[in-house]
Image (spheres, rainbow, N blue to C red):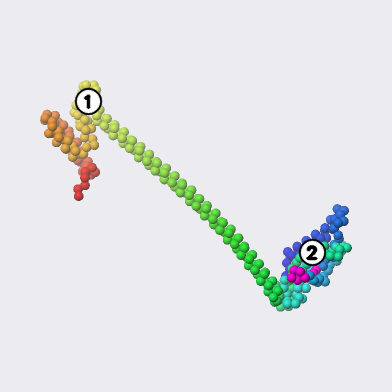
Amino acid sequence: MRTNYAIQRATAWVRDQLAAHTLAEVEGQVSIPKIVAFSLSHQAGGVVRTETGARVMVGQGIDPSYVAEFFFEKATAYASGLTGGSGMQQFVIEAHAEGQASPIAQYPMKATGVQEGDGVMSTEPATSTGLMTQLMRHTEFAMGAMARMNEQLLMTNAQLVADSQNTIRKGYENLELTEALITRAAEGEHQKKLELMQLKSREDMKAKLLTMAPAGINAVFEKEIFPTAMADTGIIESLADGMSADDLQMFAMVLQAKVKNKEVLGLFFNRLNKIIEEKQSKEALNGDISAPTQQ
């Protein structure tokens, strides 16, 4: 069954054969002989060639498309008359030149014969040769389909690999961004804690200096700039800083045993007892974390 594409290719070949001699005449060349006729031969088994009797003489103004159409029709008719029914047959269009005994150019073509009762699916005759031809055609189609399917699978697999690599790359980028944000947040939190610790340390130092200031100023100037009671209270508070209520009570017991001046000791205990009572109140509210747990 001929196709428009096959006819177009045959038409182009005929046109080239006719144009080659015309161009040579225009350029003053005489080496290319003039085409005088085209003929059609049937080729069996790729070797045996038989003339079909179809011939077209070349005249002025001949249409190459007419030559191609004519030979395709003759090839179809010849294939239909072959023994064994219709089938795909091989033919050759031959170009004959003036003064040449043998064809100077050949164009291979195929045509399918059509007999009564044949449908469009009939392509090979019901013979061993036709069966082999059909198997070869089917095998060629199957191998071509498999090659196209493998190509499609490879392209799909390559796209999947590219998409996977892109997803993995984005995942690493997101991970790095998350790590950077966590690190930055941790650094900010750490810096904030350090600033709070430094601020607390400065406040504590300031409180200690203010507590010790009255006694220190009185000692430097050797006179009572601040009342002695305030200075003594500052000394006792500085001494009691960092000690628990129990530690202060034990300290008071040691002083009571060692100090003989009961008047001074009474004044000292009066101020110390106030500090002990304040610490006991705080420990009762907050819980004494320094005291051991009773089992």
- 263 lies left or right of 26: left
Local SS, label 2: strand
Label 1: few (<14), some (14–19) or many (≥20) C-alpha neighbours in 10 Å: some
Label 2: few (<14), some (14–19) or many (≥20) C-alpha neighbours in 10 Å: some
Q: Nearer the viewer, residue 44 or 81?
A: 44
Residue on which the image places disc 1: 226
Mark 2 to mark 1: distance in Å?
Answer: 132 Å
197, above or below 15, in the image: above
Mark identifier at residue 255: none
Q: Residue at x 13, y 31 (%)?
A: 259
Q: Quadrant of residue 181?
A: top left
Part of the protein shown in magenta? 40-48
The image quadrant where one finds the N terminus is bottom right
Q: Quadrant of residue 87?
A: bottom right
Q: Residue at x 73, y 77 (%)?
A: 84
27, above or below 112, in the image: above
Residue 186: x and y, percent?
39, 43
Mark identifier at residue 106: 2
